Image: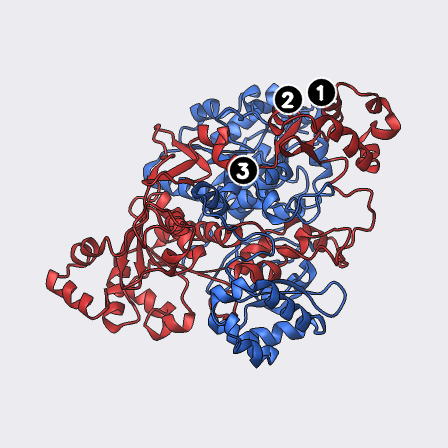
Chain colours: A red, B blue
Amino acid sequence: VLLDGIRVIEWSETLPAAFCARILADLGAEVIKLEPPGQGDPMRQQGPFMLNAAYGEDGAMFAYANHGKRGVTLDPTTPTGAILLRRLLAHSQVLVESQPAELLDTLGFGRAALREINPALIGVSVTPRGRFVSVPASDLTLTHYAGYAFHQARPVQSPEEQPPVAGADREAALATGVAAAAAALWGVLGAEQNGIGPQIDCAQADVMAHLLIEPVADYGRGERNFGRLRADLRGTEIAGGLVWLLPCIDGLVMVSPREQHQWDRWVGLLGDPAWAQDPELCGNRAARTTHWARLQEEMSAWTRVHTREEVFMRAQAARVASFPVSTPRDLLDNPQLRARGFFDHTAEGLAMPGLPFALRSSTGAVLERERRVAAPALGEANTDILQGLLGLSRHDCETLRRHGVA
Amino acid sequence: MMNRGVLEGIRIVDFSWVLAGPMATKMLAAMGAEVIKIESGARPEHVQRYPWSAVVNAGKLSCTINLGKPEGQALIRRLVGLSDLVVENFSAGVLGKYGLDYATLREIRPDLIFVSASGTGREGPQRDALAYGTLLQAYSGRAGMIATPNPQLEAMGILPAWTDPITALWEACAILAAIRHRRRSGEGAFIDLSMLESTVALLPESLFREALGSGGAAPGGNRDPGSAPSGCFRCAGEDSWLVLSIGDDGEWAALCNAMQRDDLATDSRFHDGPGRIAHRAALDTEVAAWLATRTADAAEAQLQQAGVPAARSRHIGDVIEDPHFADRGLFPELADGSRTIALPWQTEDGWRGDLRPPPALGADNDYVFGTLLGLGTGEIERLTEAGVLV
């Protein structure tokens, strides 16, 4: 376990913060997730649901973002709850939260107060726009605000019909969680060097904007015209000459025979058709870019009578880069992902993406993959943490429960 | 104050190129690591450099060495002996051919952390698959979830790079955790990072809906199934767009108030979330009509003020020059005038990494071969003329 000895307190009801803490749990930290007494994290009520799991423990996204954690119900906005959280933080290394900075100040968890409680504590604040910025936002609005959506629809033939477009699935929130986890690990390395922990401010808008590598490079070289209209329909740096999207019997495949030797092997695979002998049409990359649409048609004639699997396997066997456009079903059945043990499974048998890397230490210890995972039941660790770690009596715990604190 | 250069004293031999690896090692350089790029004037892609090279190579050193020459390989092995990490993303088998694979290098440096990033991973039936980031955006499924696939590859998640910078974030996590473990245990590690898996890990809801047969759709593109009205709407002015998403009753009330539409606020069809989602098309039409005559700037300010999640869609120029982003120092201009991207987080006093200009090709040959490896001037000249240090 890479993060042996690291205890993380998570006080949040957002996906980015929860995913940050889950990654730390994957890496071996003990993560204690605080939830409001009663219903718990609202994400428990979000679908899709696992039909054969208990009510409140059946939310698949809740399970994905929270498996491997200890669950404690505690309301730090009550005076007694705040005292208990202070005691927990004195015994912890990291606090991951997504609370408004003013609320933290009011409750005695501002920066100065935290430093008094535990100078080595690493504060990781995960918010939409920054610790002290309160603007209503969602994944969708943040992706557009940060520029990613605009550049994902640039260039296009018809800007009026092709608006800026945000990403897929929960990418914006989860990418922020990965960045926040990296930030927390940076904090751990620093705090372990001199006993002083940082306050980290990780904003989703920053994370999204920081992904825009090519547009930042364009700006850095002096580009200031960011019109979206594709000025020249004959090709771009990607479509035409570099990458083609081709129709197959059962879906779409992408292929990229970009170097001359790759192109030669690719048309060899297509049976060296007559059109491929014309140097004007496809003799070099520039010609292929100019005539990309005609080549698209010619190549489609071959791919249309093959399956994605056939094109993918045969192209790769010829050392030509090619992959199908996967559907979610394809991914669940993907032989590469399965062979690598990428998917974890819940007790109900639901496959969940795991960490995207295998790690083996020089002594041969491996980070477990293909795990059986479970999200914490509401308050499952209350007794362990409140009585065990904080030393409360059973009677104390009864009182806390009666008053809605824990 | 906490020591921020937490990787000071860590030396990294960086074979990585294109985008994902360089982005990750740039983050490590910003945390104080000494990152030595292994380049070669014999490789056109190193001489030419990618257009985004300045963005992802801030703070690194560069030396030129021809890996095809046995003497070059021997020098790298000596350098690894003085280093803590190796980062690479070669095609399968390349480093093994040069005697620079993990099995060889761990003999020289038992506590080495060796990070191997590849399209589909170094194990498994497709480990030798030839992959590019653009293609992995298709293979991961994201390109089919954003917009309708089209031969022009427009607006469907192929551009700009996504898989690469996402892989870089995961790579940073894996490396920092491995360094922490090494500091406590003295153990090195081999890390096998898959770009495909890095991308798929952020697409869970689509997989769950498929596996569970739940129906419905995960969010994707400008679809936000849990919110109505929601979407990307045309505003007055050239190519001007505003997105908004109404996720709860409070936001709905705020929107009706901003639009001065009491009739909508009191319409029982739109009274709660399920009702609004059932009448999504009608609501989106109302919003579209209201926004069509307004500038996106004015609408954004008014809606945000009212408590509605809304944003004008911005291009990178707008983002870099936006007062909020400028204040956060995310895109610093370096001493050489180049523009880079700082760490995706900041500390309470605005620190986002120590960033220095990117190196010219071979700028640090004297330091690497002379100072570190102890070669004399004559020896460096001989090796340069012999085509080893080029």
Which residue is labeled 1 in the image? Answer: A269
Lateral position of residue B283 relative to residue A128, left or right: right
Q: Secondary structure at mark 1?
A: helix
Label 2 sits on what residue type? Arg
| Residue A203 screen position, x and y as percent | 50, 60
Quarter of the figure with residue B292: bottom right
Quarter of the figure with residue B191: top left
- The chain letter for the residue carrying disc 2 is A
Count the marks: how many?
3
Residue A187, visible in the rendered structure:
no
| Residue B340 screen position, x and y as percent | 63, 53
Q: Are marks 2 and 1 in contact (CB under 8 Å)?
A: yes
Marks 3 and 1, how far apart at CA: 27 Å
**Residue A314's mark?**
2
Label 3 sits on what residue type? Met
Image quarter where the C terminus of chain B lies is: top right
In the image, A341 versus A114, the foreground residue is A341
- The chain letter for the residue carrying disc 1 is A
Q: Relative to B371, does residue A92 appear above or below in the rendering?
A: below
Label 1 sits on what residue type? Leu
Q: Earlier in the sequence, mark 2 or mark 1?
A: 1
In the image, A245 versus B123, the foreground residue is A245
- The chain letter for the residue carrying disc 3 is B
Mark 2, other Cα within 10 Å: few <14 / some 14–19 / many ≥20: some
In the image, B377 versus B356, the foreground residue is B356
Marks 2 and 1, how far apart at CA: 8 Å
Q: Secondary structure at mark 2?
A: helix
